[in-house]
Image (spheres, rainbow, N blue to C red):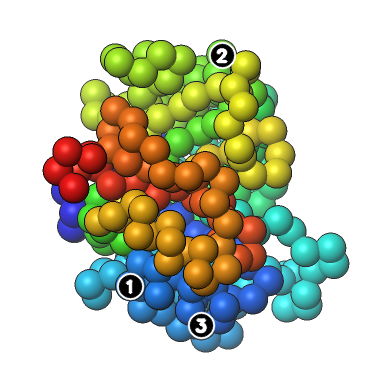
C-alpha cells in the first residue's frame, strides 16, 4: 500500500523522524539520496521539517535543541525514531511505566496535528508514540524513497515482546524462513520485525537496543555508492537476503538506517 489515506491501526509504525545537529545538511543529503522535498518549519513547530515524496509526507527532520531553543551540550546522538500509532496516548504512557518501560518525553500537543511522546522499552530501545488528529503520519510507504520496514534490535527479545503486546497490542511470532527473527503483527497484519543481539556481530548504532528504519530503493548498490560520495558510511555492504538486497548505512551526521531493494537480485 504505497499511499496511506486513513489512520494507522494502533501499534503500527506510522512515522519516522531524525534529530540532527545540522538540519539543512540533513535535508540536502536526503533530498539527493531519496528525492525528498523539505525545508525548516516555522517557530511554532521549532523549525521541524516535514519532508515529502511525490507530494506526500514521508519523514521528519529537526535540529537538535533544548526546549528553550539553545544548542544541547553535549549533542544527543543522531538517530532515526520510529513512532507507533495509538488512539489513547495517556493510557499508553501508563502501560509503558507499568510494564517496565520509561516515558522520557511526556505527551505533548503538536498544534492540531496530534499528540506525541517518546519512551523506551525495558531493554532500552527508544520509540515514539503518535496519537493522530489532523495528521495521520506517513502518507506514502513501501515505495522507493519511503519507509518500507521498522525493526527492533534488542538485547532481550523475551522482555521486549510482552512489553509491546501489553502496551500496544503488537504481537511477536517467529518468522518463517528467518531463524532467530520475529514478525511483529497488529490484528493479524505484519507491521515490522524484531531480532536479538545475542551471539550476533551485526553493526549497530550506539546503545544496546534500538529501532531501525529501512527505506525502499530501486537499486541498493547504486544508492550506497551515492551515499558514500555524499559523505556517508557503510556499516554492512549490500548483500542478498530473503526479502531482497539490503545494506546498513550511516548518514554524514551519524544517523543509521537500512536500505533495501525488495525486488531481489534476480529481478534487478
Q: Which tag, 3 or 2, sits closer to the chain's start?
A: 3
Quick one: SS at disc 3?
A: loop
Vertical comparison of 253 with 128: above or below: below
Vertical comparison of 212 with 189: above or below: below
Quick one: SS at disc 2?
A: helix
Quick one: SS at disc 1?
A: loop
Residue 158 circle label:
2
Question: How crowded is the residue under tag 1: few (<14 C-alpha within 10 Å), some, or many (20+)?
Answer: some
Residue 34, percent from left and from top: 35, 67
- Report the residue marked by disc 1: 35
Q: Which image quadrant is residue 52 in?
A: bottom left
Relative placement, left or right, of 249 versus 253 is: left
Residue in front for this viewpoint, 130 or 205: 205
CA distance separating discs 1 and 3 = 16 Å
Q: Which tag, 1 or 3, sits closer to the chain's start?
A: 1
Residue 85, percent from left and from top: 40, 45
Residue in front for this viewpoint, 244 or 172: 244
Question: How crowded is the residue under tag 3: few (<14 C-alpha within 10 Å), some, or many (20+)?
Answer: some
Q: Residue at x 57, y 46 (%)?
A: 235
Amino acid at each position: 500500500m504505497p499511499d496511506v489515506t486513513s489512520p494507522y491501526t494502533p501499534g503500527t509504525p506510522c512515522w519516522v523522524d531524525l534529530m540532527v545537529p545540522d538540519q539543512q545538511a540533513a535535508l540536502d543529503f536526503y533530498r539527493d539520496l531519496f528525492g525528498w522535498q523539505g525545508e525548516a518549519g516555522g517557530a511554532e513547530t521549532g523549525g521541524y521539517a516535514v519532508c515529502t515524496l511525490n507530494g506526500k509526507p514521508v519523514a521528519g527532520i529537526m535540529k537538535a535543541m533544548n526546549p528553550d531553543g539553545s544548542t544541547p551540550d553535549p549533542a544527543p546522538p543522531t538517530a532515526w525514531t520510529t513512532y507507533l500509532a495509538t488512539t489513547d496516548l495517556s493510557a499508553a504512557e501508563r502501560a509503558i511505566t507499568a510494564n517496565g518501560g520509561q516515558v522520557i518525553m511526556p505527551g505533548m500537543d503538536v498544534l492540531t496535528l496530534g499528540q506525541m511522546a517518546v519512551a523506551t522499552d525495558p531493554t532500552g530501545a527508544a520509540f515514539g508514540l503518535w496519537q493522530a488528529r489532523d495528521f495521520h503520519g506517513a502518507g506514502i510507504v513501501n515505495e522507493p524513497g519511503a519507509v518500507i520496514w521498522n525493526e527492533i534490535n534488542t538485547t532481550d527479545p523475551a522482555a521486549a515482546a510482552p512489553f509491546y503486546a501489553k502496551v500496544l497490542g503488537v504481537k511477536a511470532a517467529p518468522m518463517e524462513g528467518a531463524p532467530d527473527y520475529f514478525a511483529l503483527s497488529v490484528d493479524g497484519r505484519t507491521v515490522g520485525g524484531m531480532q536479538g543481539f545475542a551471539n550476533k556481530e551485526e553493526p549497530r548504532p550506539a546503545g544496546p537496543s534500538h529501532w531501525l528504519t529501512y527505506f525502499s530503493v530501486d537499486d541498493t548498490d547504486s544508492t550506497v555508492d551515492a551515499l558514500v560520495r555524499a559523505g556517508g558510511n557503510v556499516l554492512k555492504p549490500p548483500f542478498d537476503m530473503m526479502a531482497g538486497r539490503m545494506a546498513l548505512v550511516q548518514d554524514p551526521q551519524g544517523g543509521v538506517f537500512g536500505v533495501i531493494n525488495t525486488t531481489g537480485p534476480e529481478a534487478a
